[in-house]
Amino acid sequence: MSQHEPAPISRRALANDVVAVLAEICEAQIRLHDAQINLQQSQARLITMARGLFDPDAPAETPTSTIETIREAVRNAPVPHSRNEMRLEAYQERRQEVLRLYAETDLLQREIAERCGLHSDRPHKILKEFRARGDERVKQGDARRAKSAALQAATQGGKPPAAQDEGQPVQVRGASDERAALGGSCVPAQSEEFVTASGAEEAVLPAVDPVPAPDDDPLPVDELPKREPIIPITKPKREPPPKPVAASTQIPLALEEKPEPAAAPELPVDRVITVQGPMVIGPTGQWRTSPQIGRTLAILADGQLYGLDRMQRAGRWTDVKFVSAGLTAWARELKEIGVDLIQLKGIGVRLARREIA
């Protein structure tokens, strides 16, 4: 038997599975609803009976028959099947549908799989199982496809399968376009399929393409194109290494002058720092940071004391704890550009120019 790789699930098969699961859920909900109604009715009857038992004016006889009836109703209340049982029932229905379609139609097995929402190789396994049991529907489908194969062979001018010896394989080419005979696998494959006339076994042989004949006869020897002579490639000659130049003749090269670092722009007298976007400019240098940190420190540029909540609003932080957590790192960077960050716990933060010793 040929080994085929399992084909991917088609969109149609997947949609059939989803619809089947939805139908199972609806059936389970209906069963649960019926059971709930029966239990509510039984509960109401028990409550009425209990009230009658505790009523002093009620008759002394106990309605045992009614109690037994309620117990039996509760015990036999419809309970929905488990999910595995419902899936098993749905699968059994699909197996029966595969047998029906195989017996009553000329569909390929892959087409049957699409209609039933199964993998393309599943109908072949189902038919093989029921063929071993001697199922009449499989025999009917085998005979139907044997007749179709014989008519097709007769139409094409070939020898019909019935005229061949018993047990000889009947070749069915183009499995993707033609009907496979006598229960052979209808799954499209890369090789040609052969099925026996009895329909019980199958064998797969690789297709071998004949060697194509040349289109034209070979040219005579006199008419063959002449080849140009091959000129050998000579190896390049190695040039001698250059002679060393005397030290007296060497011309000294001027050393490249490194550009001096740009001086920091001058700050206004009444400002400790100047903020230009992400750039924080101090007395002795510049510090490139994020625009949000720049907005936060810009409010401290005048050297006044501000609270953390004011800095939070200026920098548009979601929480004041982010401002408190970043003070240590900001103080270290500001120190490099000549600015001290002074924090007064519980009061606020201010900036001051760093004194040069």
Image (cartoon, helix red, strand yellow):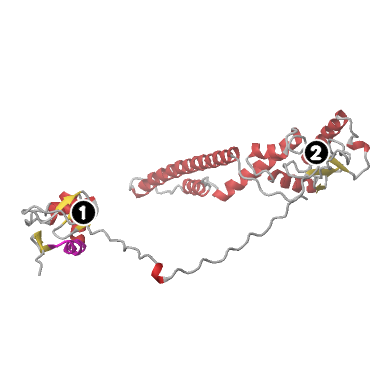
Q: How many marks?
A: 2
Decide which of 202, 285 is in the foreground and name it: 285
334 drawn magenta = yes
**Residues at marks 1 and 2, CA–CA distance in whole angstroms:** 76 Å
Q: Is residue 14 left or right of residue 223?
A: left
Q: Is residue 214 left or right of residue 115?
A: right
107 drawn magenta = no
Decide which of 328, 52 is in the foreground and name it: 328
| Few, some or many residues within 10 Å of mark 2 (<14, 14–19, 20+) | some
* Magenta region, main secondary structure: helix
The residue carrying mark 2 is 173
Residue at 35% x, 65% y is 252
The residue carrying mark 1 is 293
Can residue 318 be spotted in the picture?
Answer: no
Looking at the image, the residue that sits furthest to the top is: 155
Q: Position of residue 73 (x, y in %)?
A: 50, 46
Q: Secondary structure at mark 1?
A: helix
* Amino acid type indicated by mark 2: Arg
| Few, some or many residues within 10 Å of mark 1 (<14, 14–19, 20+) | many
Q: Nearer the viewer, mark 1 or mark 2?
A: 1
Q: Which residues are magenta?
A: 328-340
Looking at the image, the residue that sits furthest to the front is: 248
Decide which of 15, 330 is in the foreground and name it: 330
* Amino acid type indicated by mark 1: Ile
**Image quadrant in which you'd find residue 139:** top right
Q: Position of residue 100 (x, y in %)?
A: 72, 37
Quadrant where the C terminus sits is bottom left
**Image quadrant in which you'd find residue 284:** bottom left
Please say if 238 is above or below 14. Answer: below
